[in-house]
Image: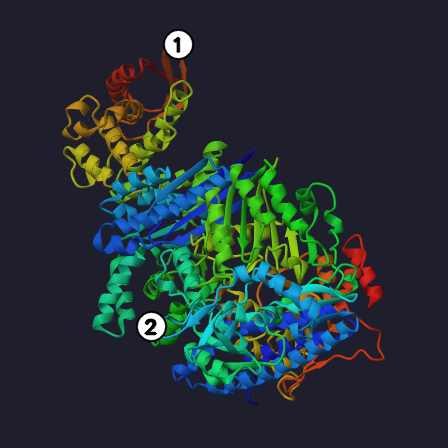
Amino acid sequence: MEKLFFNRELSWLNFNERVLMEGRDSSLPILERLKFSGIFSNNLDEFFMVRMGSIKEQIRAGYEEEDSSGDSPQVIYEKIVGRVKELVALQHEITRECLEALKTRDIEILEVSEVEEDFQTRIFQYFHAQIFPVLTPMAVDFSRPFPYISGKALYIAARIKVADKSQLAIVQIPQILPRLIPFKEQGKTAYLLLEDIILSQLDKLFPGHSVESAGIFRITRNADLELIQDVADDLLLVIEEAVKKRKWGEVIRLEIKEGTDPWIQRVLQSALSVNSNEIYQIPGMMELTAWLAFSPPKGREALAQKPYKAKRNPQMTKGNIFKLIREGDVFVHHPYESFDVVVDLVQKASEDPKVLAIKQTLYRVSGDSAIIRALETAAERGKQVTVLVELMARFDEENNISWAKRLEKKGVNVIYGLVGYKTHSKITLIVRKEMKEIRRYVHLGTGNYNNITAKRYTDMGYFTAKESYGSDASMFFNMISGFANEVVTHTLVVAPYNLREKFYELIDTEVANARMGKKARIIAKMNALVDDGMVDRLYEASKAGVRIELIVRGICTLVPGVQGLSENIQVKSIIGEFLEHSRIYYFYNDGRNEVYLSSADWMTRNLNRRIELLFPVQDPVIARRIRLILQLYLGDNVKSWRLDSHGNYLKVSGEGEKALWAHEILKELQYKDNESFIAYLKERM
Amino acid sequence: MNQLYGAIDLGSNSIKMKIVQYVDSSFKCLENITKEVDIGEAVFTKGYLKHDKVEEIISVLEYFKQVMETYEVERYRAVATSAMRFTENSQNIMELILMKTGFKVEILEDTVEKFITYKSIRDNVPGFQEIRQGSLLVELNTGSCDVSMYLKNRLVMNEEFFLGTKILKNLMKQIEAMNVNYLPVVGEFIEARTNHIFRMIKNKKIHHYLVVGGEVKPMKDLLFGGSDEILRRDFEKVYQRITTDHREIRHLVEEKGVDWYELVSTVLLYHTFFKLVKTDVMVPVNVNLRDGIIAGLIEEDYQLNRYQLFNQDTIFLATSIAKRYKTNLPHVKWIQKNALIIFGEMKQHYPFDERDEVILQLSALLHEIGKFTRMKDYMNTSFSKIKNLSVLGITEEEMKLVAYVCLMMISPKDFKKNENAVMVREDQINRIFKLGAILSLADALDKSKRQKITLTRVTLSDGDLKLTAQAQEDVTLEYWDYEQKRRFFINTYGIHPRLEFV
């Protein structure tokens, strides 16, 4: 039978549609629903910045090879454009529904023309006092080059009459001002859009000229950071240079407000060198990411999702953190359990005189990070601090360069990883000289050391003082420092060295067991499943009779449920309040019930081009807890979508069944240790 | 007691470091780092290392320094092996390393390197005692190949060949340019270079075939599925594939970043000796110099004498050499025995170097080897033969010392007049005299070479060394020589030997 694959880009767009559809969930607070519209926009921006450029490049280069789904780059491009247009239309429809619902709760977005006349004076005053001083209108004519247009910023394009001729002028909507400007009107809370206020006062910017028409537009530039890594002597310098260049990336999308004067559109299209199929007409409010930063007015907090306060891991509440880890492995599940325990460990280590060294990988660090401060303290106290800062974490490069330089100044040994490989693994190693011997403490995670995202992403962390992990962690840091070639490990599995082989081996074991008539089962939870080799392996496993349940949040190129190929494979996706981010791999292995956590998805880039880690959960109780969490995810019938063999995601309907809402159950569950977690979760299921 | 130990090994292909913790008589490995730096390629083709390669070495060592500092390791030993031995500018490089990293790197002589590796084998290979009953051990490194044979718990043969993987690689490339079927040709070359020892190995009761070397691990992992024991039939299959159509296997090897030529050199060489042994199993031994270095450091710190066996091996090898030169073995062994008895008492009262006991025994066993080629004036012939000998576990410097002690022993009166003695270092004179005095006394006690005098007891008190002996026959000759050598002993130690018969 021919192997089947879904196209990865279209699969990603399907994922973004699922995100968008959360905005239709009437059980959620309205502002939470609007946030999903903002997330959709944010995701789509990244998609254009990262993926579209490379597809366009393939077309330009005349590359006509079909991908594993059977489509050429040109066909894929056309399909993407069509699908994006559909989804954007849906987004605005959903946003309108939400705004309508908001209106019934006395909150509305008004246009300036809808505001009563008395109020117009106040708008005029606000414009002059707050907005006008920060505006910089830029005229476009033959004597001046077309001004630089920043990616993802909103602009007004105006057609100005100058000496009987039309001339274009550009005004950037200032990003330092709030996008939604509130005011009270007859007991209601109303908001005006910043761009709408500017449009209403546009003639004030061009005194002596008449404004014939105006429209709002926004562009997206290609931001795929390509480095010529073989010649990169100093990675830091190369990345700084590439980030600078990114600002000048090619325009790959022009969004323009529907109904804008065709003359303006023509001039913009020509000036920005945009093809017609790269122009997207936006029917409603542009740049919906504004809803991500939107807070409800005072007294109306119920309109938004109640902020969730994470529990402190019950095992880590008191006592010496090192002693606790020594006594037994500790598992933390974020965001249900606070990320503070990880920060605490690094902080305690930085102050502990017994600690000799701290080594850590940092991929995406949050703004004012307590971890960074702790690492600085440790270095100041004379400890050996080694930090791998992955400069190439997409869109975080500038942030990472800034931390890297700061840490270096404090005496931290900052390394930038192996040229050609992104270091995506999440690991901390603490070396401590104790009474009897040197002991190593390790934290391994599925998510980044980022205390902001740890409140929104579901991730898992594992603390251990077991020697096999410690010794492997030391080896790992030597390897990523570029000073060790041999990757011989006891417990950890490292990509790109042996991770793919390990996964193949684990799957093959299930296949062999299934062929012997034994029970064989795989449950794998990840962000994306894109690697053809892994998909092939899973098809083989399905054919051998292995029961495979996949929980894939985003892209999935595997086609499930095809007779003779994948009838034993089920794929589901969970989209909800928290971004599913943990990577969990379970293999039945003839009753051995092996559970692994990882920083890696089953994507070619993770398995071949990144430094990733997979580690076994050796503590049997923790492994049981994780298995039960997987069961909960599999049973979720509130926020789950099931992928069918045609590539459609169908919302799982829990009608007539007991509702199982994984995120909510995990948020509410109270327990004192892993055993009680298991007992209470079983009750809830 | 809790102690950290470090070992650094600057090899031909890589620089390695190991840090262990020695707790409650067991090791815990804290770091084991290997960084590939190809030193050998340049050295074995050009003879020296360029500045950029030296910089690369230094940057790796700087990192190792940092790791050592992390653990606060104070006790360590850094060594360099064959590549550095062959590098013209090695002293300059060592100085640069010291200046930039603080590491004082010793360039190991091959005999010492082997000795350290053997220590590691003893600690890491299960059933080592059993293996010594009958085994062939072939160690292949970048610069040389070393073949040792153990029979009845004795090291009976140790031969070194200038047949390292780098050398074979160069040869192989040259032959490959001439003949597509180059591998059997290289196999033929290996046989031609080693076949003089085949006779010694064939038909011996060898039940264990052990192979050691830098390419053992990749060979085992890539060609034999990581197996700890390689069966003859499996080895033969791989050998056949390699020597007939190796395209697929070469692709597999090179895909893993392993040097094909070096790996295949290993297979060819191990195959050459596999044909000679009776066993059907080849055991790839995963040992390294670092383990041996650390074992040595621990031995020193804890005054362990776990490696006595290796000194015995050195003595056995010296005995084999003496035998090869048709030495009167009963005589030299008698001297060895009596000298050890005297030394045993002397060391209770006088300071000696910890290696003096081995030097003394080697001198006793080897002092007459010059007679094989020249009876007249044999002492100078012995001297030049001894100083050029290569014996497992003995440094070049020590071998020279043995040669000087022999010179002193044979002719103490004329020692200073001897042209060879002109080169003796001032700091060695005292040591040579002390050992020479003991040996010449022991030699005198068997002047007739008929082992008539048996020393039963030696005691030192009030400035007298009382030698209690038994003799059944006339010992006039011995007594006459004893009186001659006695003066030398008195002049050296200020002690009066007194020979008494019971």
Residue A531 image-quadrant placement: bottom right
Q: Earlier in the sequence, mark 2 or mark 1?
A: 2
Which chain is indicated by disc 2? B
Q: Amino acid at mark 1?
A: Asp
> Looking at the image, which residue is at 25% across and 58% down?
B193
- Percent x, y of residue B222: 44, 66
Q: Closer to us: mark 2 or mark 1?
A: 2
**What residue did someone put label 1 on?**
B462
**Structure colour scheme:** rainbow
Q: Amino acid at mark 2?
A: Thr
| Above/below status of B26 relative to B274 | above
- Image mark for residue A270: none
**What residue did someone put label 2 on?**
B243
- Percent x, y of residue A560: 64, 83
Q: Is residue A474 left or right of residue B161?
A: right
| Above/below status of A512 relative to A70 | above
| Quadrant of the snapshot with the N terminus of chain A | bottom right
**Is B323 in front, or is A69?**
A69
Q: Looking at this rendering, what residue extends furthest in the top direction?
A: B462
Q: Secondary structure at mark 2?
A: helix
Instruction: Verify CB contact (< 8 Å) between mark 2 and mark 1.
Output: no
Q: Is residue B333 left or right of residue B134?
A: left
> Looking at the image, which residue is at 52% across and 46% down?
B29
